[in-house]
Amino acid sequence: MPRRLSKLVLSAFCSLFAVQAADANVVVVLNSRDATVQLLDQATGADNGTFAVGKEPHHLMATPDNKSLIVASSVGNELIFLDPLSGKVQRRLPDVLDPYQIGFSPDQKYFVATALRLDRVDIYKYENNNLALSHRIPMPRMPSHIAFDAGSTTAFITRQDSDQVSAIDLKSGAIKWTLPVGRLPAGIVMTPDDKYLLVGIMGEDYVDVIDWRTQKSVKHIKTGKGAHNFRAVGDKRHVFVSNRVQNSINIIDQNTLENVGMIPVPGGPDCMELTDDGKTLWVTLRWIKKVAVIDVASRKVLKLIPVGRSPHGVFFANSAPRL
């Protein structure tokens, strides 16, 4: 290859790499009340643009192949697929009614969406990036967040306005059991050993620990008022829980089932995302139209970044593992 041509190829490669590296630093924030997606620069916090989506986008997650980021527009009744690196719209899937929270089973065969406003849960079969509705299960009142067992047999759903958790058989769509818990259950996660469900009790100040095989609550982990949502630290042991009323985030040891740390955060902390090095936690603040950037080691807020009204879901591609 001539020297001049090789330099051009190298220059083009470097430019492409620079663009991809820059895209990887895009932070996607859902402004629920503004019905917008906002893109932030992860390094500087700069606003890289906002675009409209369907009403009340609340939650989001990457597809199993990490090639798309799905935004659930609940009142807009659609799923919007974004490029996870750039945040640009790839495609829209209309007529998905009231997708509030969404999740893939660990074996990637099922996609589950809770319809909080319409009081039901929809189970789709997932194959080759296509969704086919399998079961539609009535589930009053206000089915909210989702967790799965490691074997991908069961979806666990918090029923926010019924103060209950239900287990649904993914294959048949049958409700296996329903268990009373504390007031306003919200976020729910499975511990890495597949033994316990952790449930944020938003109407109280604790996380309920459920032995899902015996269908019993075995412990309350005291956190802060408004225990709401979870984000794994990525070490297969610890998990963050946001407390929307207390304005704090706690760290729970999932081996000992103890609260082992607290981070003060203003403005109603909600959804969280963690950088791949585990050093920086990004948190949406529902009440004050901001996103907090937190230094995990010092447990201090580094900066508050202005965003739209009622920011909810947050995502970036270069994130820590979710276990």
Image: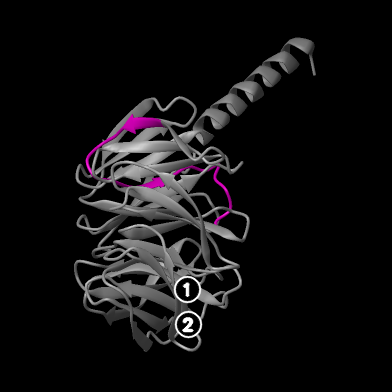
Image coords of residue 240 (percent x, y): 48, 54
Q: Residue at x 45, y 54 (%)?
A: 250
Magenta span contains residue 306: yes
Q: Which residues are magenta?
A: 303-323
Residue 214 vs residue 118, the one in the foreground: 214
- Specify the amino acid type for callout 1: Leu
Q: Residue at x 57, y 30 (%)?
A: 21
Pointer 2 or 1: first along the chain: 1
Q: Residues within 10 Å of mark 2 (few under 14, many from 20)?
A: many
Q: Which image quadrant: the C terminus?
A: bottom right
Magenta span contains residue 124: no
Image coords of residue 202 (percent x, y): 30, 63
Q: Residues within 10 Å of mark 1 (few under 14, many from 20)?
A: many
Relative to residue 6, is residue 21 drawn left or right?
left
Q: Residue at x 47, y 32 (%)?
A: 42
- Specify the amino acid type for callout 2: Trp
Image coords of residue 127 (percent x, y): 50, 68
Q: Which mark is residue 212?
A: 2
Q: Find numbered disc 1 in the image and state the secondary structure of the residue it sits on.
A: strand
Residue 282 vs residue 146, the one in the foreground: 282
Residue denoted by label 1:
197
- Name the residue furthest top: 4
